[in-house]
C-alpha cells in the first residue's frame, strides 16, 4: 500500500500572539534599560539593555519566520516550510552567543579602569520590574509550549529567561557597588560579565536543540508510544513494525509500517490505513503528515 497523507493545520495563532507579546515587551524594556543605564551610570544595566535590543531583533525575525513556516506545502517543499523555524532558532542562538561575547569584552575592559561614577539607586527599581515581568513571561511561554511544541516559542521563552537572569545579576552587582565597599567597586562590571556568561550558555542550549530538529532527531519516547497504542487499537491492525516521527516547526511528520492480514483486498487495506490516520490525527493535532505502509502478515 502506498503512502497516505492527511494534513491538519496546527494551533499556531497562540504561539504567534505570544511571540508578538514578547516583541512588545522587549522593545519597551530595551529602551528603559538602555536609558536607565546611561542616566544611572550602570554598565550592567546598559549591557542588559543592549541584550534586550538584540532580543527585539530576534523576536521580530521570529515573528516573520513563524508566519513563513505556516505556508502550506508546495511543489518545491512537499513537506511544508516548518524547518524555517529551526533556521530562525539557530540564528537566535548564534545571536545570543555573539552578543554575549561582545558585551562581555566591553565589561571586562572596564574592570581595569572602572568609571568614576557609581550607579544610581533608581536603576534597581527598573531591574525589579524587569525581573518579575520577564520571569513570568518566560514561564508562561514554556508552559504554553508544552502544548504547542514550537521551537521558535521555546527559543523566545529562553531569551526572556536569559533576560530575567541577566537582570538579576545586574541587580546584585549594582546593589554591591552601592554599598560603597572598595572591594565591590567593580561589582557592576563583574555582574555584566556574569550576565554575558548566562547569555552565551542559553545561546548554546538553543543551538543544540534546534540542530537536533534539523537533523530529524527522534521525538520523545512517550509521544511514539502513544502513537503505537493508537495504531494497534485499530481493528485489522495486527502489529506496528515501525513508527518514525520527526518534527518540522510546530508540526509532526509520521511514518508507520503496519502489519495486516495478507488476504485482505486493496480496498479493505486502504480503509484500515485511513482509520489509522484518522485516529492518530484525533489523538494529536500536531500531526500534519502521516504515511502508512501496509505489510502483509
Image (spheres, rainbow, N blue to C red):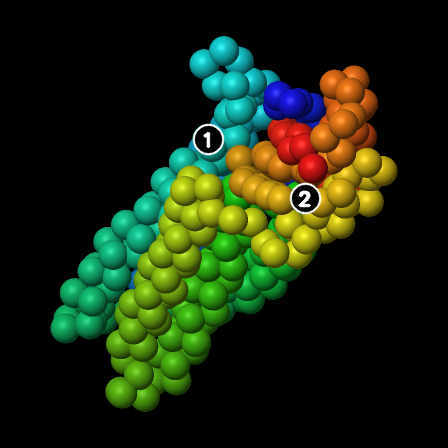
Q: Can residue 202 be spotted in the picture?
A: yes
Residue found at x 36% / y 40%: 91
Residue found at x 53% / y 24%: 79
Q: Residues within 10 Å of mark 1 (few under 14, many from 20)?
A: many
Residue found at x 39% / y 84%: 179
- Check the picture and name the quadrant holding the C terminus: top right
- Describe the element under mark 2 as helix, strand or loop: strand
Tell me: 257 left or right of 160: right
Q: Residue furthest right?
A: 235
Residue found at x 37% / y 62%: 201
Camera-side residue of 278 and 65: 278
Tell me: 2 left or right of 237: left
Q: Position of residue 262 (x, y in %)?
A: 72, 30
Q: Position of residue 197 (x, y in %)?
A: 33, 65
Name the image quarter holding residue 88: top left
Name the image quarter holding residue 203: bottom left
Disc 1 + disc 2, Cβ < 8 Å: no
- Check the picture and name the quadrant holding the N terminus: top right
The residue beneath circle 2 is: 240
The residue beneath circle 1 is: 84
Camera-side residue of 182 and 133: 133
Q: Looking at the picture, does residue 97 appear above or below residue 13?
A: below
The mark lying in front, picked from 1 and 2, is 2
Q: Earlier in the sequence, mark 1 or mark 2?
A: 1
Amino acid at each position: 500500500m502506498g503512502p497516505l497523507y492527511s494534513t491538519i493545520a496546527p494551533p499556531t495563532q497562540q504561539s504567534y500572539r505570544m511571540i508578538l507579546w514578547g516583541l512588545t515587551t522587549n522593545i519597551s524594556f530595551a529602551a528603559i534599560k538602555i536609558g536607565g543605564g546611561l542616566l544611572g551610570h550602570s554598565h550592567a544595566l546598559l549591557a542588559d539593555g543592549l541584550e534586550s535590543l538584540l532580543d527585539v531583533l530576534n523576536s521580530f525575525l521570529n515573528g516573520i519566520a513563524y508566519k513563513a513556516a505556516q505556508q502550506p506545502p508546495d511543489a518545491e517543499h512537499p513537506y511544508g516550510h516548518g524547518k524555517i523555524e529551526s533556521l530562525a532558532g539557530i540564528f537566535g542562538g548564534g545571536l545570543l552567543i555573539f552578543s554575549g561575547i561582545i558585551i562581555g569584552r566591553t565589561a571586562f575592559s572596564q574592570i581595569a579602569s572602572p568609571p568614576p561614577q557609581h550607579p544610581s539607586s533608581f536603576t534597581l527599581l527598573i531591574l525589579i520590574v524587569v525581573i518579575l515581568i520577564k520571569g513570568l513571561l518566560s514561564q508562561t511561554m514554556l508552559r504554553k509550549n508544552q502544548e504547542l511544541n514550537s521551537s521558535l516559542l521555546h527559543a523566545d521563552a529562553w531569551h526572556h529567561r536569559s533576560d530575567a537572569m541577566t537582570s538579576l545579576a545586574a541587580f546584585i552587582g549594582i546593589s554591591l557597588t552601592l554599598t560603597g565597599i572598595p572591594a565591590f567597586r567593580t561589582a557592576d562590571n563583574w555582574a555584566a560579565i556574569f550576565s554575558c556568561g548566562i547569555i552565551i550558555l542559553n545561546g548554546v542550549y538553543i543551538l543544540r536543540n534546534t540542530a537536533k530538529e534539523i537533523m530529524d532527531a527522534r521525538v520523545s519516547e512517550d509521544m511514539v508510544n502513544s502513537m503505537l497504542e493508537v495504531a494497534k487499537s485499530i481493528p485489522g491492525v495486527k502489529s506496528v513494525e515501525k513508527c518514525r516521527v520527526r518534527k518540522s516547526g510546530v508540526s509532526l511528520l509520521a511514518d508507520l509500517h503496519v502489519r495486516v492480514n495478507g488476504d485482505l483486498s486493496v480496498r479493505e487495506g486502504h480503509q484500515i490505513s485511513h482509520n489509522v490516520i484518522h485516529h492518530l490525527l484525533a489523538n494529536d493535532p500536531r500531526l500534519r503528515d502521516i504515511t502508512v505502509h501496509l505489510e502483509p502478515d
